[in-house]
Amino acid sequence: MAAAAVLPAPVDAKRNWTPIIAAPAVSSLGNDDFDPKRHLAFKEVPKVYTMKDIGLPEDTGISPVAVSEPFPLFTEEAVMRMRQEVLSPEVLGNCQYSSNLAQCQLRGFANKYAPFVYDVWKNPETLAIISKVAGIDLVTEMDFEIGHINISVKSEAEKEEELQAFNDRAQYEADEGIAGCPWEDDKPIVDWHTDSYPFVCVTMLSDCTTMIGGETALRTGTGEIMKVRGPQMGCAVVLQGRYIEHQALRALGTAERISMVTSFRPRCATVRDDTVLTTVRPISNLSELYNQFSEYRLEILEERIRQQLKELREANSAGRKVATRKLKAFFEEQEKFLAHMNREMVDDEEVVRGNIDDSHLLKRNPVAVETAVKSVEAKSKKRPRRF
């Protein structure tokens, strides 16, 4: 995917669209703190699909889990509270970004303007749920990445025009005996990409009752396209997005689609952290991003050194020889860790605002790529596999 140097549209603090869910009065929502018993709707672990299930090596990522089916996570009250903060004038006026991958995003607002959203994702019970679904103990990546918002909006006229076009095409395909959903590949909300961070939790903040489409498309290890159905309002999907190429397909039948994406990394310092900043540098306050990235990575390094120092001292106290090869391997690993950090922190003046290149995409088998491209170009006469 070649990316042109696209600068984001000028930020307009005044919203030029109307949310399809009428916001309740502030007094009716209240301003109570996040309460897991009141605001979490999670009941049981959903069905998950493994890396092996989607044709990728089992050791590709940091967990065998690739993606979950949508599952209830938040109550309606919690969703309304989050919408209230996310769509506030402060957030819309100060935290909007756009790029060649997505036209409207809100980032870096939770710890400044959205205390409820911030507390939702930092709460131990929320983290325990996400970790359970992901199959590995996780923590939020960094404060800047809490509650990243993707917004897709249409006017009522545009919505009706799309639905009419869809109905006309569906009738034609029915008459011709063709199955498929060609409109979904034409204008994705977020184009093909891999995430910068190991895991994400995608939560729907819009009413999707009448929505057609809106799935997440995954590129499998064989190059095929698999689709995971989109979550309903208050529901979520957990995806190991750093290691799986995916895109958010556009939806019909609704005037807005607001999704919240919160990123996670492994809690354990000894688990590898493959975080990159490729897809987030051009749509971030670099000072905040680099500060938080450096802080948590140095904390990981600090913990690793503490553990290694403890082992070294214990071995010396027990009269054992220094395990030279093991120690040198540790040094080499940390050198790579620091070199990776250095590469990701590109000088500010070299970052093109809004321009995300394709270096984040995984290296794929050329045959698999050709198969996928032909599948999309032919509009797939065979309906894609869906979860």
Image (cartoon, rainbow, N blue to C red):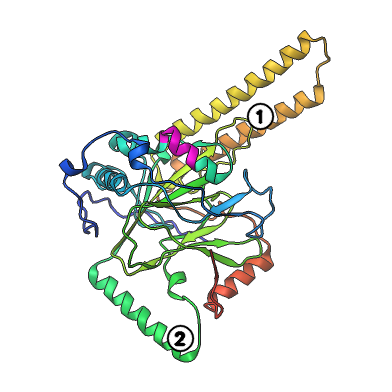
> At 50% from the left edge and 56% from the top edge, which residue is drawn?
69
As drawn, is 239 to the left or to the right of 74?
A: right
Residue 321 shows in the view: yes
* Label 2 secondary element: helix
Instruction: Report the residue marked by disc 2.
Output: 173
Check the image and report above or below for 305 versus 26.
above
Mark found first going from the N terminus, 1 or 2: 2
Residue 141 shows in the view: no
Determine which of the numbered discs, if any, sits on residue 334 in the image: 1
Check the image and report above or below for 226 versus 237.
below
Q: Which residues are magenta?
A: 122-129
> At 81% from the left edge and 22% from the top edge, which residue is drawn?
324
> Picture coordinates of residue 265 (x, y %)?
53, 38
Tag in front: 1 or 2: 2
Q: Quadrant of residue 332?
A: top right
> At 41% from the left edge and 38% from the top edge, which residue is drawn?
121
Determine which of the numbered discs, if any, sits on residue 382 in the image: none
* Label 1 secondary element: helix
As drawn, is 91 to the left or to the right of 309?
A: left
Distance between mark 1 and mark 2 Cα atoms: 57 Å
Check the image and report above or below for 283 versus 211.
above
> Picture coordinates of residue 214 (x, y %)?
41, 64
Amino acid type indicated by mark 2: Glu
For this rendering, which residue is in front, 4 or 344? 344
For this rendering, which residue is in front, 365 or 81? 81
